[in-house]
Amino acid sequence: RPAPPPALVGRDGLLATLRAELGAGRSVALVGRGGVGKSALGAAVAEGWASGPRFWYTFRPGLSDRLEGLLFTLGRFLHAQGASALWHQLVAEQGRQPDGALALGLALADLRALPATPLLCFDELDLLRPDDADQARPAHTQILAFLEGLRGHAPLLLIGQRAFWASDAIVTAGELTHADLARWLELLGIPHLPADVGHLHDYTAGNPRLAELCVALFQAGAHGSFAAALEQLPSSHALLPVWMRLERGRPLAERRLLGALAVCRTP
């Protein structure tokens, strides 16, 4: 589970909506553009979840995008909470993937056996979206069917850039406003003028991840002022058409890799 951010600026309304929907036991799709802070919002919701335990699972290509990996992690979590039907079946299978319907039935039985219903969070669901409806990967289809089977039995937080799965509610995380950015700079203790906030908003379009990069540039250099650091940001958009032309000629695997590198915090 990602660590909750020290402060979430301009997200009080979103947090209240997420907590209300999930507190009612519903499944919620949290969507928004890359870098807008969806995982941070989810981490804040999970950290403040007082109704029961919290489970977090992030889908990663080639690492955690198969049903057996999800079942092992979820089964171990439920076993740690005192409900072990799924875990015992996985042990009996000795590493083989159990039937999906059987695994779902055992997971639901475990959820019913728990004294408090857990919050189940699933991040980076975009990985499971097929690029072509006729080329859906069976492993991903199995995962989506399993997640659909959990609906109505536990509160589900499903995080991705676009909701292509079924859910009871959709919550969209948008960009930060001028006031949000000003408040954020104040919390960071960065001296600034209203014009600096306007410059930062114009450059980043309110995207929190891009704003973090701009602040990192200021904190890592000897620019004297925040305004001076902003002046060092690249101002030419000449690379955009070059990038678009290159992107069209790249194989699918390379486009996925470039997309991941563009928004992920770590390799």
Image (cartoon, rainbow, N blue to C red):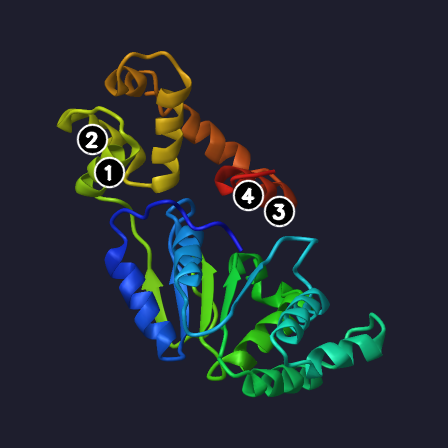
Q: CA distance from mark 1 to mark 3?
A: 36 Å
- Foreground label between 3 and 2: 2
In the rendered image of this protein, does residue 147 appear above or below residue 9?
A: below
The 10 Å Cα crowd at callout 4, few under 14, some 14 to 19, many 20 or more, is some
Name the residue beneath numbered marker 2.
197
From this viewpoint, which residue is outermost toward the right?
94
Secondary structure of the residue carrying numbered label 4 = helix
Q: Which label's residue is closer to the chain start, 2 or 1?
A: 1
- Residue 260 circle label: 4
Residue 148, percent from left and from top: 53, 78
- Foreground label between 1 and 4: 1
Name the residue beneath numbered marker 1.
181
Q: Which label's residue is closer to the chain start, 3 or 4?
A: 3
Q: Nearer the viewer, residue 57 or 198?
A: 57
Q: Which label's residue is closer to the chain start, 1 or 4?
A: 1
In the rendered image, which quarter contains the C terminus? top right
Q: CA distance from mark 1 to mark 4?
A: 25 Å
From this viewpoint, which residue is outermost toward the left?
194
Check contact, mark 2 vs mark 1: CB within 8 A: yes
- Foreground label between 4 and 2: 2
Disc 4 marks a residue whose amino acid type is: Ala
- Foreground label between 1 and 3: 1
Check contact, mark 3 vs mark 4: CB within 8 A: no
| Residue 98 visible to the viewer | no
- Residue 252 circle label: 3
Disc 3 marks a residue whose amino acid type is: Leu
Q: CA distance from mark 2 to mark 1?
A: 7 Å
